[in-house]
Image: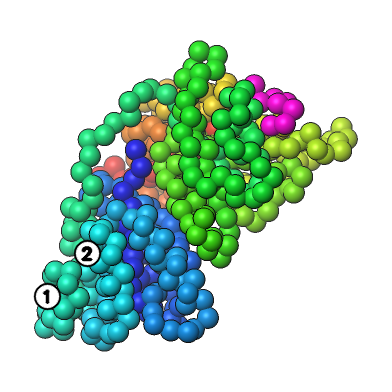
Amino acid sequence: MALPTVAFIGRPNVGKSTIFNRIAGDRISIVEDTPGVTRDRIYSHGEWLATKFAMIDTGGIQISDAPFATQIKSQAEIAIDEADVIVFIVSGKEGVTADDELVAKILYKSDKPVVLAANKVDNPKSREDIYDFYSLGFGDPMPISGVHGLGLGDLLDKVVEKFPKTDEKTDNDDIRFSIIGRPNVGKSSLVNALLGEDRVIVSDIAGTTRDAIDTRFEADGIKFTMVDTAGIRKRGKVYENTERYSVMRAMKAIDQSDVILFVMNAEEGIREQDKKVAGYAHEAGKAIITVVNKWDTLKKTNHTQQDFETLIRNEFQYMAYSPIIFVSAVTKQRVEKLPELIKRAYDNHEKRVQSSALNDVIMDAVAVHPTPTVNGKRLRIYYATQVKSGPPTFVVFVNNPDLMHFSYVRFLENQIRDNFDFTGTPIKIIKRSRK
């Protein structure tokens, strides 16, 4: 089931990106005082009171002939179409402007739930500066300060209340996997090769697949639901109306999947956009299989495959867990191995490890590589336990989490992987004080 989606909409320079970053917990969007810095939609995930959701940051909508103004407005309208709830952000310091009224008119037409937030109000308890915003017609404006984080909890309470209420559950126990990649890497051809029949339109024209198509099939007695997603394009190249939903729907497909097939084009090698595409899936904590397609088109030597794999490992170091398979959707070379790989990655993604076995591995690791000492204080590890799967997540209880450097966390992760098969899936280690 797709995560509910929140879009942050407003005119330029009202603090949308600052609020987006604070909720996302990172500086994902560029924040400057120059209006129009955020030109395209930027995606991330947020969580409030155990409710997870997807977020879209957008460029500001304004009445202007400034460069990119038309495209920015187009991107914002796409975000509005994809959102379940819209946060309409205005500036409490400047009052209602003509651009605010323009945004309000666009939102009236959307027929989506809207939460009005008056940003840059350093004292949210003082409401005298926000009365003018009632004229926009979206009820009580919520005073907040994105810079100081004031009032964001109340804002998120109201946002979560407006999420669609659903008890919908998946109607089958299929393994769900998505096929993602930048345009023209052969995703649709790979779908047809897996199915053994032409159920999806195939074309050499980049961007032919405009939507996400769910297809159920069975292989080796295992049931799968396959989602072929529209190619994820570079930001700045998604302004065509015919493609306007492709990126967001690919993101939603990733959220709904257990396993991701990350497809690359062997002819073109690794592009910068490949890293961004893979990053979406990695950050979502999904099991990932790296598929190098069009392998039949290369002139090969005895070292071609090894050299290509080494290049991938160097460029995608954060995905060392992902198995690499070289295929040809046209000749069906090695395509028959994909269902088995998907099943293995799925099983590892959902795997649980007994605490006793886990702690044996952790204690043996500490004996081989003693914990570090920082400023005269030695890190002490008491015990560890797995708290969830999908992806496997472990909590390590220590005397002081600040003493556990990320390099030692990586060492423990490697030890866990050496003792338990987690091929295809990321694992997470959370350090926590025993107290």
Q: Label 2, on which residue? A: 115
Q: Can residue 381 be seen from the camera position used here?
A: no
**2 and 1 marks in contact (CB < 8 Å):** no
User: Which amino acid, mark 2?
Assistant: Val
Find the magenta span and give its range: 329-336
Of labels 2 and 1, earlier in sequence is 2
In the displayed structure image, the side of residue 197 where residue 227 appears, left or right: left
Q: Is residue 296 left or right of residue 109?
A: right
Q: CA distance from mark 2 to mark 1?
A: 18 Å
Q: Position of residue 283 (x, y in %)?
A: 47, 48
Q: In the image, is 21 to the left or to the right of 270?
A: left
Where residue 365 sits in the image (x, y, percent)?
51, 33
Image quarter where the C terminus lies is top left
Quadrant holding the N terminus: top left
* Residue displayed at 23% across by 63% down: 114
Q: Residue at x 60, y 50 (%)?
A: 207
| Residue situated in front as seen by the camera: 92 or 86 | 86
* Residue 56 higher or lower than 217, as above or below: below
Rendered image quadrant of residue 120? bottom left
Q: Which residue is drawn at the image coordinates 47% and 77% (left, top)?
A: 69
Query: Camera-side residue: 163 or 424?
Result: 163
Mark nearer the viewer, 2 or 1: 2
Q: Amino acid at mark 1?
A: Lys
Q: Residue at x 79, y 40 (%)?
A: 307
Secondary structure category for the residue under label 2: strand
Give the labeled residue for mark 1.
125
- Tell me where residue 169 appears, x and y as whole percent: 29, 31
Residue 234: quadrant of the picture: bottom right
Quarter where residue 142 is shown: bottom left
